[in-house]
Image (cartoon, coloured by chain):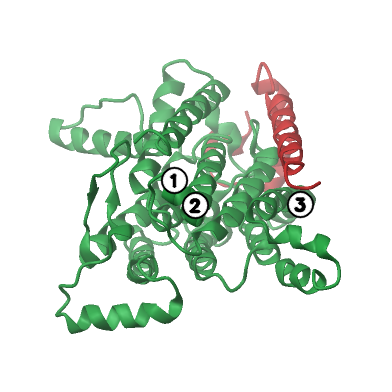
Chain colours: A red, B green
Amino acid sequence: MSALRKSGTTGAMGEAHVRDFGANVTATPIAPVRFWIITMMLVLFGLSTLKLR
Amino acid sequence: MLLELAQYLAKDVRAFNVFGYITLRAVLACLTALAISFIAGPLVIRKLTAYKIGQSVRDDGPQSHLTKAGTPTMGGALILVSIGITSLLWGDLSNRFLWAVLVVTLGFGTIGWIDDYRKVVERNPKGLSARTKFAWQSLIGVIAAVYLAFAVSSPSNAKIFDLFWAWVGSGFSMTLPPKADLILPFFKNIAYPLGVWGFIVLTYLVIVGTSNAVNLTDGLDGLAIMPAVMIAGALGIFAYVAGNTVYSKYLLLPYIPGAGELTVFCGALAGAGLGFLWFNAYPAEVFMGDVGALAIGAALGTVAVIVRQEIVLLIMGGVFVAETLSVMVQVLYFKWSGGKRIFRMAPLHHHYELSGWKESQVVVRFWIITMMLVLFGLSTLKLR
């Protein structure tokens, strides 16, 4: 664990960006959430066809 | 802006009349805000990273949160820019409520910006002092409340001053028309007359309270923004109904001329929020910070006041309410009992984390609860 993580304070951004997402999470739900967002967008697009014709 | 252009072009090409419909502009505002967030998001994150604008993490919080230290924050600015541009593009710029909500949103965003800036850029851990922040929030909240008390009760801006002077002339005792009453959901004929003072106090509490409640909830990746998106969507429906003579009469809701345009604003808020969630989903690449949380909360509160659905906002924002109450109860009980705690940690999401739920589980479960509450809130449209 880096000094940054131990201190828990705002630290150098360089360190923040080497943070290892994979090591700390068993599953990364970012993909499903992004798929949900895409679906919502498509639903909205579909709904717009109610008026756009 | 585009509405005016469409109206101009519609003189020659009738197809452009389609942009006059609020529903279509709301959907397009949502998609536009989403697109702006997608395009500007990576750029904003790179800039925040370059300027070393990173989040600090409370040392006494859950250990799993220490890895979040240094993640770029103040990403709420992206939401505000997205909402601002989109509302100006698709909104009716002659609409008074649109401007009122935009001003309140940007006002609270500015307070959050200054607080965040001092904390993460100037490395001043105190940021804005709680008292100063609250004073500025109160100032904007009171000004908005006074304006809305008369704006909601008047069909146009021209009539606002007439009503205001009539109130002053009556020795501050004049009551407001029934449309300014506090509506009790699920009851057809029960509404509590607030009067001018009551309206101002309630509006102030709703705007400032919602703003701070969203800020307290913004402690896990995506926890605050998705409920805000869902509530914005529902308030957009309420705004459409309140601004439509036929639907408001049919659903026994007060008709507020001009409130329908807030559907476009709510669409923009929902789109900008979803676009932000793309980068804020666990594990977050960026946090919204106070600049986003305070502004979004204030926006939701202001819209709810204009469409006369304060209690429905309380229902739909149940997660925000629970988070706020958990902090209040924890602090009061801690002081009263001499050091004992009810929750393992406050706000509530930390309690569940320390109870063994994973961060993403807490977040998605709170989303599901909000979805149910929003549906429950929407049912009040018909169930009365």
In the depicted view, which residue is nearer to us: B6 or B299?
A: B6
Looking at the image, residue B40 sits to the left or right of residue B374; the answer is right
Q: Quadrant of residue B29?
A: bottom right
Q: Is residue B342 above or below residue B103?
A: above
Badge count? 3
Structural distance between the alpha carbons of marks 2 and 1: 6 Å
B206 and B250: which is toward the camera:
B250
Mark with earlier residue (2, 3): 3
Identify residue for label 1.
B250
Q: B168 left or right of B7?
A: left
Q: Position of residue A15 (x, y in %)?
A: 69, 41
Which sits in the foreground, B230 or A15?
B230
> Residue B45: where, in percent of width, then height?
72, 50
* Residue visible at 38% across and 67% down in the picture: B148
First in residue order: circle 3 vs circle 1: 3
Quickly name the residue at label 2.
B246
Picture coordinates of residue B344, whole percent (x, y): 34, 24
- The amino acid sitting under disc 3 is Arg
Residue ID for mark 3: B46
